[in-house]
Amino acid sequence: MTSSNGNGSARRLTINEDAQAMIDEAHRQGIDTVWDRLEAQQPQCGYCALGLSCRNCAMGPCRIDPFGEGPQKGVCGAGADVIVARNLGRAIAAGSSSHSDHGRDILETFRSLAHGETTGYEIADEAKLRRLAEEVGVATEGRSPEEVGADVADVLLEDYGSKRGTLSFVGRVPEIRRDRWEALGITPRGVDRENVEMLHRTHMGVDNDYVNTLLHALRTSLSDGWGGSMIATELSDVMFGTPKPVMSEVNLGVLRKDQVNIAMHGHNPMLSDVVVAAAQDPELVELARSLGATGINVVGLCCTGNELMMRRGVPMAGNHLMQELVLITGALEAMVVDYQCIMPSIVDVAKCYHTKIISTSDKAKFTGATHVSFDPKRGAEIAHQIVRMAVEAFADRNQERVRIPVEPVRWMGGFSVEAILGALGGTPKPLVDAIAAGTIRGAVAVVGCNNPKLPQDLEHIELTRRLIENDILVLVTGCAAVANGKAGQMVPEAAAMAGPGLRAVCESLGIPPVLHMGSCVDNSRVMVLAAALAGYLGVDIDQLPLAGAAPEWYSEKAVAIGAYVVGSGITTVLGVQPPVFGSPNVVSLLADGLDDVVGAKFVVEPDPAAAALWIRRHIETKRRGLGLPAVEIDGDGPAGTAAPVPAAVGSEG
Ligand code: BF8
Ligand code: SF4
């Protein structure tokens, strides 16, 4: 189908030159992309957009009339509050389950490694393993890393059930917040348990009190942030190394016309890490040379790309909306995928080229793709097989169709909590002192996706820029990180874009004002850092001058992240409206009532200038609460970036 967006419109779809060039190329070749399909879906369902449709049972589907004229109850009698809350709860369970199942795969691989049953994996950070062991009560004295690892794996596997009544890493949460969770009944007990219970509660005729449903939704999300995601991050560090500052490159310019290009797309480093290792095998490099390539170039996409970049400095081709466009370069021999955020459409786009789509997870097959079932017990061998398939595809490449539209941009990553504290001399004190003095006003985690409803990356870049120029340190993960990387905001020289206080701190440490903390499961690192700051100051997380933002979110995983960030005490600003506005009661709870019980809430503000102003005021309010010097933020903001503040949901500014 020929796309209807037409030539010349690419500039309103994305701010990136590489993406614009490839969208134009797609139009020339009549290849549909995500933006064409979004247009074809218009108008999208208004009931669903408001959260007012339900198909949880076969008496339905039902919908509630938002104008009060049509039905106000589903066939079972559920009204707007129950339906909206149930839908939100199910989205959180889906997102939380996705992260947590990724964590389970890492955990099972780690357990196999500890039992000597894998190839291609090692215990790369033994010191971290021993720290984790001590934390979860596993003896380390005089024991081999494998023995310790086997016991740690068994303890963490229990976190998926609910044998102990609380998750191992909940001990990291400041006591004052744990008490709050206990009082609310939202301490996460077991990863699987909370998710199963969420699905149970949202079956017809179970939890018919929207407040009760939403409290359990928070508990479910906390089992992700302090459970499944945290297990994924911690054990990935043990197996693949804890990230340290590293330079790399980003955008489609990382592809090489003279090399075999393999894009790793998806999320789990247990696949991508062994493929990167296999691509260095001299036998495969020689095979590539024999076919006329000068080498093998592995690049990342989305979160698995972030995992590789953080630990190995592997170049990054792009974020979520680049997954089809990277195929249109004609330069990819293979896109190797596991799971999450992988559009089914890549199979159709790849058919227009010589590119092989290689699926690897038995949980995530793609009709039309080549499936190589990945078993970590034979990790090295299967990775070798995958790279060989990619190299052999080079023989079919048509170099005349290759179009690599830009030069790559440098970016820096690797800011694990360990790396951040290491740069500060092993203690949060210098950061706390800088915040206390007001040199740095606070910190904001800008996270999440791309969404084709917004110009790609615009909100990420604009929001981040306004925050750093006002001396707010920005922490990034996921596709938000990639957006900032492409914009050149993640190199030490970008300190020049920051306000004078943040600039001085960054220059003295040689770091960017926007710190890459990893993939989406690595939002758990943000939680650990926030807990460490709160613990150091002896306060609760919600008292800190922090905020979260998901300017371009699209996925259920992002909803789960937003919920556990808020549940942990960090107010979060969403740039895309969540499907909850069909229930004024649910909106009032999320945007206001939650503040009373967890000390944080959701704000919806699509305009990045207004979002930045709102966040700055929020941070000053928190500073005042801690007795730190605070300033009034007037409505004009800094010169040149001012915008009046439209009424944000739950506005306190
Ligand atoms: O987990 S930021 S588009 S790639 S959901 Fe997906 Fe969103 Fe990207 Fe990673 Ni996260
Ligand atoms: Fe309709 Fe109730 Fe069934 Fe939902 S659960 S589809 S509202 S009858």
Image: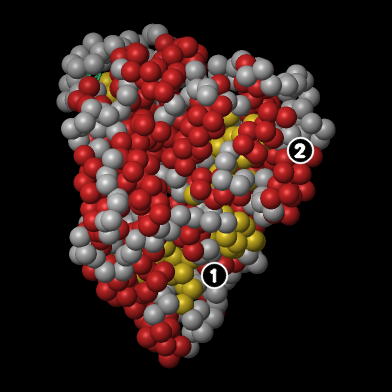
- Is 385 drawn above or below residue 559 in the view shown? below
Q: Secondary structure at mark 2?
A: helix
Residue 2 is marked as none
- Is 523 drawn above or below residue 203 in the view shown? below
Q: Position of residue 311 (x, y in %)?
A: 48, 59
The amino acid sitting under disc 1 is Leu
Q: Would you identify the image quadrant in which residue 635 lies?
A: top right
Residue 255 is marked as 1
First of labels 2, 1 by sequence position: 1
Q: Residues within 10 Å of mark 2 (few under 14, many from 20)?
A: many
Q: Nearer the viewer, residue 126 or 463?
A: 126
The residue under the point 35% across, 40% down is: 135
The residue under the point 65% across, 39% down is: 430
The amino acid sitting under disc 2 is Gly
Mark-to-mark CA distance, 2 and 1: 37 Å
- Give left or right: position of 606 versus 558: right
In the rendered image, which quarter contains the N terminus?
Answer: bottom left
Residue 501 is marked as 2
In the image, ligand 2 is in what quadrant?
top left
